[in-house]
Image: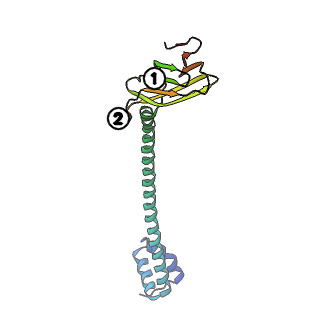
């Protein structure tokens, strides 16, 4: 059979040939022309190659979209977990901080002894607590003591209040945690 198709017509038919939408007669005519015409055969090979690249790119795009969805979902799960951890950690840290490191000022009875050269403060600590820190300031004959307590733990055993302060001037009054415990004018202990 003699092929009467020109290269232009065959090249117009090649996309339909690749998509398999030509009639059997047209397919035979295109295939016969391609066997005889190297230029059209090269155009067909390039079209098939570009079609394969397009299909590969589509497949890669689908895979990339899937991986993006997985990554987005993974990021969302991690954010949710971190949010839950932070929301649970804040109260836990506060509880631990208060139990182990929190400082309290407790209302207690103290024995205050004042002599010319020292102020002695003694007291029995409540069960479950121990002394943490004492700060003693003096100004114009007034001694102000702040005694802080923390919960006692296995590594921080119960320790009683036993503070001795050497005043710089004649002591007129002694305050402990804001309460008056000794006054010179009365000469007596002011404990409740």
Q: Residue furthest front?
A: 116
Kindly identify the residue that appears in the image at 46 percent across and 86 percent down.
3
Relative to the observer, which residue lies in front, 59 or 180?
180
- Local secondary structure at mark 1: strand
Q: Residue furthest right?
A: 140
**Residue that carries the numbered disc 1 in the rendered image:** 122
Of callouts 1 and 2, which one flags the residue occurring earlier in the amino acid sequence? 1
Q: Is residue 74 left or right of residue 189?
A: left
Relative to the observer, which residue lies in front, 92 or 105?
105
In the rendered image, residue 173, in percent from the top left (x then y), is placed at 58, 18
Q: Is residue 119 left or right of residue 96?
A: right
In the rendered image, residue 151, in percent from the top left (x then y), is placed at 41, 30
**Real-space Cα separation, disc 1 to disc 2, in angstroms:** 24 Å
Please determine whether, in this image, residue 147 is positioned above or below residue 182.
Answer: below
Kindly identify the residue that appears in the image at 57 percent across and 11 percent down.
186
Kindly identify the residue that appears in the image at 54 percent across and 81 percent down.
8
Kindly identify the residue that appears in the image at 48 percent across and 85 percent down.
4
Residue 131 lies in quadrant: top left
In the rendered image, residue 163, in percent from the top left (x then y), is placed at 48, 27
Please determine whether, in this image, residue 40 is positioned above or below residue 19.
Answer: below
Tell me the quadrant of the picture where the N terminus can be found. bottom left
| Number of residues whose C-alpha sits closer than 10 Å to that of mark 1, classed few (under 14), some (14–19) or many (20 or more) | some
Q: Residue furthest left?
A: 154
> Residue 154: which disc?
2
- Local secondary structure at mark 2: loop
Which circle, 1 or 2, is nearer the viewer? 1
């Amino acid at each position: 059979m003699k092929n009467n198709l020109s290269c232009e017509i065959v090249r117009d038919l090649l996309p339909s040939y690749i998509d398999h939408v030509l009639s059997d007669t047209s397919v035979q005519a295109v295939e016969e022309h391609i066997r005889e015409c190297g230029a059209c055969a090269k155009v067909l090979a390039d079209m098939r190659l570009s079609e394969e690249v397009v299909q590969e790119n589509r497949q890669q795009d689908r895979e990339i979209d899937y991986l993006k969805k997985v990554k987005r979902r993974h990021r969302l799960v991690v954010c949710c977990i971190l949010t839950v951890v932070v929301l649970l950690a804040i109260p836990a840290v506060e509880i631990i901080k208060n139990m182990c490191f929190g400082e309290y000022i407790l209302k207690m009875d103290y024995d205050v002894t004042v002599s010319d050269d020292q102020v002695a403060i003694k007291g029995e600590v409540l069960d479950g607590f121990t002394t943490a820190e004492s700060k003693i300031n003096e100004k114009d004959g007034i001694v102000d003591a702040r005694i802080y307590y923390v919960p006692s733990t296995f590594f921080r055993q119960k320790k009683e209040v036993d503070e001795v302060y050497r005043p710089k001037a004649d002591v007129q009054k002694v305050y402990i945690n804001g309460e008056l415990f000794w006054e010179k004018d009365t000469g007596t202990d002011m404990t409740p």
